[in-house]
Image (cartoon, rainbow, N blue to C red):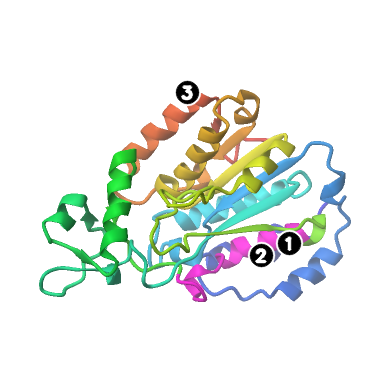
Amino acid sequence: MMKTKFEEIVDVSRVGSKNTKGLNELLVLANAEKMTPSSEDVEKVLFIGIDFQNDFMENGELGVPNSHKDVERVTNFLYQNLDKVTTIALSLDTHELHQLFHASWWVDAEGKHPVPFTVITREDIEKGKWMAVEKNESLAYIVHLERLGKKQLLIWPYHCIEGTHGAALEGQFSNMVHFHSLIRQSSIQKIVKGQDPLSEMYGIIKPEYAETDGTNYAFLHSLLAYDKIVIAGEAKSHCVLESVRQIVEYYVDKHELLSKIYLLDDCMSPIPGFEESTEHACKELQKNTGIHIVKSTEFML
């Protein structure tokens, strides 16, 4: 029986706001708990939390609608399963101001930068509609995107800039994952992504395109050690969906691994405008690969 109540770890009224609880307070609470170390788990469970960061919260620079409720539900799920989740892995979207998907990278003939959510195509560059600070590399990247059938290059609002509040884990989610780490004696795996100035990186495994192989093989191979892999995060339409696609693509012939993957559908939300395409893509993944799409309130570990 847990001595520490959920409300002592997470204040749902402060999701997306300043976190007033320090890690040392959590340590005091954790020290009162007697829970088996995760290293002794018979069934190994991995939770992957994708980009639960301040800038993806509703009041963030690239706010995702309903993200606050996602955090409330996912922290409840983790609390209910503190004794069952073996390892927590977290991705941290991390950028600089001057990257190919930010406005500062591009100008038009009048020297003006594109507004957020502008699509830039190969034709735009060839016709001089948009000019890049790194012309050859930028054009080559877009050519490869179009050739590979990837998403079009989209100019995103500045978000998750390294060292800023927006790039940090959302505070209440941070409380829960660090509490788990303390009471289960389990190190959090933190995966930093998105730092290449010449590539987008939605998924946690590899960039959309890069000249060199940037695949995180170590993390991919680590998945084989788990009996269940639970995934949630922001945004469902981009970073979550692409992460799952990349795992599925790598393990396309390992159906026994894919059948261990569970997406917490009520703990992730899409970027506006991508709702319908995201739902269609998730249903296709479930149908074709054997992954499971579940609700956190109904799924039992």
Type of the residue with mark 3: Lys
Q: Dot 3 surroundings within 10 Å: few (below 14), some, or many (20 or more)? A: few
- Magenta-colored stretch includes residue 169: yes
**Residue 287, image x and y in percent?**
47, 23
Determine which residue is flagged by label 2.
175
Q: Dot 1 surroundings within 10 Å: few (below 14), some, or many (20 or more)? A: many
**Residue 90, image x and y in percent?**
61, 55
Determine which residue is flagged by label 1.
179
Type of the residue with mark 1: Phe
Q: Do labels 1 and 2 touch, CB within 8 Å?
A: yes
Q: Nearer the viewer, mark 2 or mark 3?
A: 3
Q: Is residue 277 left or right of residue 222?
A: left
- Which is nearer the N-term, disc 2 or disc 3? 2
Please state the extent of the stretch shown in magenta in the rendering. Answer: 161-181
Q: Residue at x 59, y 41 (%)?
A: 296
Q: What secondary structure is marked by label 3?
A: helix
- Which is nearer the N-term, disc 1 or disc 3? 1
Q: Residue at x 32, y 46 (%)?
A: 144
Q: Nearer the viewer, mark 1 or mark 3?
A: 3
Determine which residue is flagged by label 3.
287
Type of the residue with mark 2: Asn
